Image (cartoon, rainbow, N blue to C red):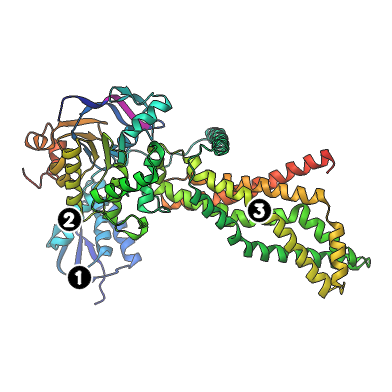
Amino acid sequence: METKLKYLITGDGVLELELAGDYLKYDDEKVIRELYAATESSRVRGVRVTAARLRRWDSTLLVILFNLEKIARRRKLKVQMEQIPDGLKQMLVLAFAVDRKPAGEKTESIGFFEKVGNWGIKIVSGTRKGCSFLVGAGASFGRLLKGKAVMRRVDFLFALEDCGYKALPIVSLISFMVGLILAFVGAVQLKTFGAEIYVASLVTIGMTRIMGAVMTGIIMAGRTGASYAATIGTMQVNEEIDALKTMGVPVGDFLVLPRMTALVLTMPLLTMWSDFMGMLGGGFVGITMLGIPFQRYWELSVEAISLGNFLVGVFHGFIFGIVIAVCGCYYGINCGRNADSVGVATTKAVVSAIVWMIVMTGIITVICEVLGI
Amino acid sequence: MTNEAQIEVKNLTIGYGDFVLLKDISYRVNKGDVFIIMGGSGCGKSSMLRVLTGLVPPQKGTIIIDGMDFTRAEPSVRSDIMQRCGILYQSGALFSSMTLAENIALPLQQYTSYSEREINELVSLKLALVGLAGFEEFYPSEISGGMKKRAGLARALALDPEIVYFDEPSAGLDPVSSKLLDDLILDINHNLGTTIVIVTHELSSIFAVGSNSIFLDGETKSIQGYDNPRELLKNPPNEKVRNFLTRGGSEHA
């Protein structure tokens, strides 16, 4: 049954609202606004609601009555409710029964200087936390060398498996594709000079010196760094880290050490593998597209490998291993205590690992420049 | 139950940053007590437990455990005290990558020089004590919530602690499992003389096991009741305690 809100204002200033029929999903915006406006008008000195013929109703009607009564209370008008169903009456009572008020404004707006100050404090405390984490990780490593670390062999082996051969397929695929792209882009340019034969050295030098390590680093940050942060973060949410702390088990030894050691050991190996796969990718373009015979391409590639470049690449891999493991574990351990914060921790771990890898690449490049490698 | 103090809390203030949750709290837990820390949601009971177990430092005040200052203890003394305490976390907090046996063996490996065989036997015994004999090789994800709590209790009991802390032991348990856990708590208390500290708001548990209790109130940030819970119900010191122990007045003693 189509129902409308019907109201009138009597001569002595009483707004009479008669509810009749069904009010289900009632959303006649115009009439409702008019009703509120009428209640606000200075002519009105009281409100009377009668519901003798009201049949069915839901929260949409309740909202109207709730707002009506709020306006009336604010304007100190007398409200009469006649023949209102018990359920509706009780719900209104419940809605006005304030149990506890918010203690204060939830979001205080703060000034510019305070914002900058808070930001500064955050950076300082974050740096301090990060440094103490690094020192702790170093101490754990020291204990490992002395054979005193509380690390389960099985945890280490599990981590080694996870970031070792299980990572091979994705590292292989991406590195092959990167080698392929390098060769392809290089070939298009080199062809204009008739120098496409140099594609082999381009790919080999590019992959061994930096691209192999960087690609492996990015893959492992997304794959393993994220998984470290999520696993350890979930342990934080489940109170497992609390349990470790109160049991007196050093969290650094137990959680960080196996993961970091595994990643630091596998990253250089994965980098070497990535170099190789990249060269294969380059070879694919060289042989199929440029028509360089396999034998010739292979010779050119081997000629282009220099021990310096190769070692610099592997060293990058080693450093990236530390960066990824530290970022993953740090954000995992400092994760908040709800599901949302695990997501935040994972994002931060991956983003900061990538940023720090680029920073480290810059530093290593400058050092190599100075040393003339 | 003796009159010897196991835990003495003196003028403890708990909070985070500028925010004070509880102020100037003092109470003592005697040896062999089943001590209940109760209060409404958000009153700071869980924070109290985090401070008692050393996870969070208090803003002010001292906690003395067995006559030793726990709040300002050197790391070695602290670790010494922690070995005498077992904790059952709300979710059980079992390490999900380890079997139940490995979970319970961890504190034993950490603090004792027992051989592997001895540790295995102890683990089986502790699991049997909580009714989980034969579950050694199960992973936490393979057992129910109630079983996880019992396994967590087995781990808390691994080192024969003098004090066991419980964080909301009945949370998330059906009435029968909850009753079983209460019985287990009483068994441990009676037979091993272990001091028990329970943070909870579950009335049935409070009356079933508590021998002494404090009622924390978040509004006044203070202790509003400090006695045996049944005594508190009989002679409530104020309206807040009466309301809490009678579910807002709907239940009568």
| Residue B149 placement, left or right of A46 | right
| Residue A143 placement, left or right of B170 | right
Q: In this view, does B46 lie above or below A164?
A: above
Q: Which quadrant holds the C terminus of chain A?
A: top right
**Residue at the spot 42% in from the left edge and 43% down from the top edge:** A241
Secondary structure mostly taken by the magenta-highlighted segment of the chain: strand
Q: Do the residues labelled 1 and 3 touch (CB within 8 Å)?
A: no
The quadrant in which residue A294 appears is bottom right
Chain containing mark 2: B
The quadrant in which residue B174 appears is bottom left
Question: Mark 1 to mark 3: distance in Å?
Answer: 64 Å
Q: Do the residues labelled 2 and 3 touch (CB within 8 Å)?
A: no
Q: Is mark 1 on a helix, strand or loop?
A: strand
- Residue A228: x and y in percent read 52, 51
- Location of mark 2 (residue): B176
For disc 3, the neighbor class at 10 Å (few under 14, some 14 to 19, many from 20) is: many
- Location of mark 3 (residue): A217
Q: Please tell me whether mark 1 or mark 3 is closer to you in this view.
A: 3
- Residue B2: x and y in percent read 15, 27
Q: Can residue A344 be seen in this view?
A: no
Question: Mark 1 to mark 2: distance in Å?
Answer: 42 Å
Region in magenta: B9-15
**Residue at the spot 16% in from the left edge and 36% down from the top edge:** B240
Amino acid type, callout 3? Gly
Q: What mark, if any, has residue A56 been given in the picture? A: 1
